[in-house]
Amino acid sequence: MRSTMEKTTTPVITIGLNVNNQAFDYSMEELKNLVMANNMENVETVTQKLDHPDSRAYFGKGKIEYLAQLVTTTGAQVIVANDELSPSQIRNIENETNATVIDRTGLILEIFANRAQTREAKLQVQMAKLKYQLPRLRTSASQRLDQQSAGGGLANRGAGETKLELNRRTIEHQIDHVRHELKEIDKAYETQSKRRKENKIPTVALIGYTNAGKSTIMNQLVTKFGENDEKQVFVKNMLFATLDTSVRDLHLPDHKQFLLSDTVGFVSNLPHQLVQAFKSTLAEAASANLLVQVVDYSDPDQQLMMETTETTLKEIGVPDLPMIKVFNKADLAGTNYPTREGDNLIISALDDQSIELLTSVISEKLFKNYVTKTFLFPFDKGDLVSTLNHKFNVQSTDYTEDGTKLTVELPEPDVARYSQYLDKD
Ligand SMILES: Nc1nc2c(ncn2[C@@H]2O[C@H](COP(=O)(O)OP(=O)(O)OP(=O)(O)O)[C@@H](O)[C@H]2O)c(=O)[nH]1
Ligand SMILES: [Mg+2]
């Protein structure tokens, strides 16, 4: 008897067009991973070499006929294309193969929609989906609404009203609505991030290809350096485990403090609708003092994954920020770790020494213009004492007869502000 717990996966055929693309094999591999991430099973792959996609049906006529046969022999009811297709291409392939066609963008949107947990992520995905649907609305004679059947208020919109226009207007209305809701969330975000900036706490953003180990590194750092109430983030061996940006407050043993953010991972050709929708979430990376690019060192495609990451950063509008590269999962790559060469580290997120090394490099980068000074504040300058305690890393406090003596580690440019209180001894 079959177990009822057994997962059913949808069999699909993946198709891809090689238009002289050097990274073609990699992108097909990625597509298969995306298919799996969407709980589907790749049963066949069909590719074709062409100078450009066939405007009618993406593939040429002969290949489409072959595809139709494959649909029959494999029983696959879904075809997943490696590119974004036009509505008519989708329709033509569907008509000629009798399978449902999903393009790369549609697939990624589906995965994101299934993963989204928080209200913000759900809204962002919804926004991306609506923008994807808008130009893809189909019209047909049977969909036309006549004035009578539309009734009441709708009839007032004129005889030319079609179901298509109605749908379009509904979607535009929904987009406005979602945009409004996201703006509200954004406002709260901005206040938070403004407060962080005022506090001058430096920020570090973990970025990189999906499944590279960003969230795992985040959790290791939170375990070691998080205050009690700092929560762990979600980790799983699947594409796009993280869709929300999480920020955690970390305190190093030497009183230095920084904020670490973990965010959505990248994949090549991330749909522009999604990039647009996730821009505010990703803004956390854009305003960071340091980027930590996490790379899966055990993956043979790591070089292309790094290129994908850099392209995506540009697309989001992240400026050239200081960056270190963390080649992670070294335990699976069979190399020595942890090691460091300049701004490149080879580590395993599962190894404590690796996390120590990463921390020391982050600290070195973030606090490089820090100096340690001792100040003596007269008793009537209690406000300054509390300001310094609030803003910087006070290493020791002495209550002397002349006032409060503070040994503080602070950025060099800030010393000038308090120079009159520098301790002469
Ligand atoms: N062996 C090994 N596994 C690791 C290491 N780092 C992460 N993993 C595993 O890799 C998988 C993905 O890790 P995550 O931390 O969720 O990756 P991510 O970069 O946050 O992925 P997304 O959120 O999907 O972008 C999980 O199963 C982790 O346990 C490592 O150094 N060694
Ligand atoms: Mg993650």
Image (spheres, rainbow, N blue to C red):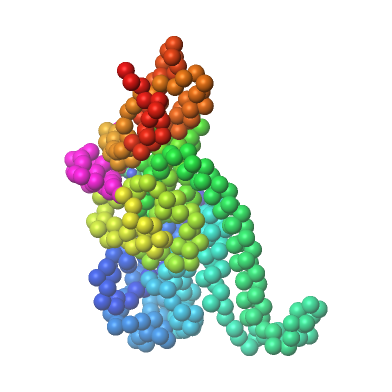
Q: Position of residue 238 (x, y in %)?
A: 40, 52
Above or below, comparing residue 138 to residue 305 in the picture: below
Number of marks in the rendered image: 0
Q: How far from the left and from the top, in percent, is residue 351? A: 29, 35
Report the side of 342 relative to 417 (left or right): left
State yes or no: residue 204 in magenta: no
Residue at position x 51%, y 32% in the image = 229
The residue drawn where x is 62% and y is 60% is: 180
372 left or right, relative to 401: left
Quarter location, residue 400: top left
Quadrant containing the C terminus is top left
Looking at the image, can residue 75 be seen?
no
**What residue sits 42% from the left and 51% below the top?**
287
**Residue 28 visible, this angle:** yes
Residue nearest the viewer, comparing 38 with 208: 208
Residue 314 image-quadrant placement: bottom left
Residue 96, picture quadrant: bottom left
Q: Reply yes or no: does residue 345 show up in magenta.
A: yes
State the residue lying farthest toward the front: 420
Residue at the spot x=40%, y=48% of the render? 288
Q: What is the x, y in percent for residue 110? A: 50, 63
Q: Point out the stretch of residues depicted in magenta.
A: 323-352
Residue 337 on image: x %, y %? 21, 39
Judge by depth and name the residue closer to the eye, 49 or 270. Answer: 270
218 to the left or right of 182: left
